[in-house]
Image (cartoon, rainbow, N blue to C red):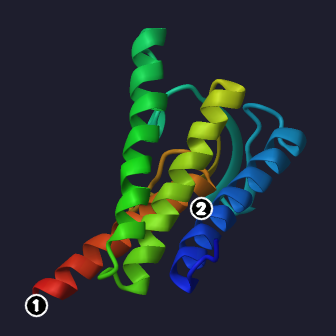
Amino acid sequence: MKLSRRSAYILLVIIITIALDQVSKTIVRVHVNPSERSSIIGEYFTLHNVENAGAFLGMGSDLNPTLRILLLLILPIVVLGFVLVHIFKDKSLDNLSLFAFAAIIGGGLANVYDRIVYGSVTDFLHIDLGGVFRTGVFNIADLFVTTGMIILVVVSFRKKK
């Protein structure tokens, strides 16, 4: 079976997203002590090593184990599977939308992988622009998911004009 350029593009974005995320998390797990905080750019951009048992910003970490498995493992896998099928089937999607969906899938799968293998997701980046803008602690997978969502919003507004 020969992959089309479009399918290869989708799979490449997903694989690169997962690889970048997993390599960065491995480096953090090996070289950054838990609860240690290091400056990357002053206090504006810092490096941490935080194990997140929940979803975005720790939401769901206090759920009972059955509900946590359902909401943080099974549901994301099902949703990501549907999105993957959708982007392979919908030939009308432009390359930017394909990138966005593939980045979301790759980031989602990378975090699901962590939950399966480690029981939690390693988060390590934090941005604090002195009260103007502040994030929770996040990882590369989160960055790809968020970037993909922003791209999809921008693309949808462009199409409406």
Secondary structure found at label 1: loop
Q: Quadrant of the N terminus?
A: bottom right
Q: Position of residue 22 (x, y in %)?
A: 73, 51
Residue annotated with mark 2? 44
Seen in the picture, residue 42 relative to 122 is either above or below; the reply is below
> Whole-percent x and y of residue 105?
49, 56
Mark linked to residue 105? none
Q: Which mark is residue 161?
A: 1
Q: Is residue 42 above or below residue 123?
A: below
Q: Residue at x 70, y 43 (%)?
A: 48
Image quadrant in which you'd find residue 53: top right
Residue at 77% across / 31% down in the picture? 34
Question: Can you give x and y, in whole percent of width and height, for residue 137 in the image?
Answer: 56, 45
Q: Earlier in the sequence, mark 1 or mark 2?
A: 2
Residue 26 placement, left or right of 60: right
- Quadrant placement of the C terminus: bottom left
Q: Nearer the viewer, residue 1 or 89?
A: 1
Please state which amino acid type lies under the numbered disc 2.
Tyr
